[in-house]
Amino acid sequence: MSRIYFLAIAFLVTVLQPTFAAEMKKDYVRYIGDDKAGKLDTVIVSMKKGDIKLDLIGAVHIADKSYYSELSGLFKGYDSLLFELVDGQRLKEETEGKKTDPSDKEADPSFAFLRGMMTNLASYFKFQYQTEGIDYHSANFVHADVSFEEFERMQAEKNETFFTLFQKAMRAQLAIGTDKNAEPKGGQLLLALLGDSSGIKVVMARSLASADALLDAIEGEDGTVILSERNKVALRVFEKQVAAGKKNLGIFYGAAHLPDMEARLIKMGYERTGEKWMTAWDIQPRVQSEAK
């Protein structure tokens, strides 16, 4: 198993959102631990402008069940919770009793492939998939993302595809070099062969928490539809919610989106007032976990 293999998985996690940049030298995801056990944490960034309060809630899309349970409790406290999900407007239509046209086209094959891979990863790591852990039908949830049709149009305008993004990621990794600390050790691979995925979780967590330079290279100067263009859509929805009188809001997006999103909000006059960390992956070797 090579470093490139794990970076490929990390990139696919990023796509749905996606992982994690570190603009302005701030952390949005962190790993705390050693080669055997540790925690992958995501951040909630609190911001304010006048009497408007906003939390930017970073997410990983496969995680411990307890992580999504804690988030679900948090979400109930917002006037509006803006969420990331390409074509997620269909969920709100179901909630509002609107019929979905059976002739609507199915999800893009790339998304179907990624969703299947994420589901398989969740099963292997004994994680929960985000859409299974979060109730997107909640009354205060507001879709703040693009439809499949909009996504495809925007990618076509930028000549962007998942394949070209993956190519950029691989070129960037070759230019940046490898981090020996993030490569799987013999003992971690042995555990995996014996059915204990904790060592591989550690490798994945370290890769996800240190992917800032890689994502900076993918974004480049022109940005991508995957990250910055969708951020623009989310913030337009946010401004509409504020204009409608909402004062306490949350934006629940993949942690990769937060650096660019926070930078845009600062330009809009918002200031960071604090941060809180949540544990998405509590990684413990199986033997140690069973002994407790």
Image (spheres, grey):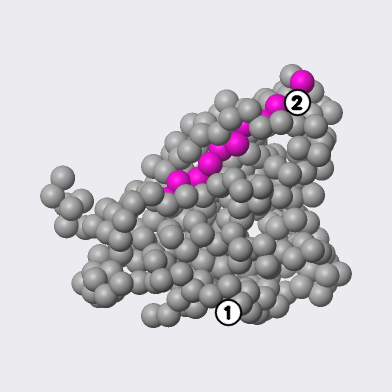
For mark 1, what is the residue?
Answer: 174
- Measured in 3D between alpha carbons, the distance from the residue under mark 2 to the one under mark 1, in whole angstroms, is 42 Å
Q: Give me the residue at 30% from left, 61% from top.
A: 35
Q: State which quadrant residue 92 falls in.
A: top right
Asked if residue 143 can be seen in this view, the reply is no
Q: Are marks 2 and 1 in contact (CB under 8 Å)?
A: no
Residue drawn at x 36%, y 60% is: 202
Give x and y (percent) for residue 192: 28, 71
Is 43 included in the stretch rendered in magenta? yes
- Considering the image in quadrants, where does the N terminus appear? bottom left
Report the residue at 77% width, 44% height from top.
Answer: 264
In the image as oriented, which residue stretches furthest toward the top? 51
- Say left or right for 177 vs 100: left
* Residue drawn at 51 percent across, 49 percent down: 29
Q: What is the x, y in percent for residue 212? A: 59, 59
What SS does tag 1 mark? helix
Look at the picture and state if 37 lies above or below 162.
above
Q: Amino acid at mark 2?
A: Lys
Along the viewing direction, whichever of 209 and 132 lies nearer the viewer? 209
Residue wearing tag 2: 49
Work out whether residue 94 or residue 190 is closer to the camera in this orientation and state it: 190
| Amino acid type, label 1 | Leu
The one of 157 and 102 positioned closer to us in this rendering: 157
Q: Residue furthest left?
A: 291
Magenta-drawn segment: 40-50
Looking at the image, residue 4 lies above or below residue 144: below
79 magenta-colored: no
* Residue 64 percent coordinates (x, y): 39, 49
Q: Residues within 10 Å of mark 1 (few under 14, many from 20)?
A: few
User: What label does residue 247 carry, if any?
Assistant: none
Instruction: Name the quadrant of the C terminus.
Output: top left
Residue 97 appears left or right of 119? right
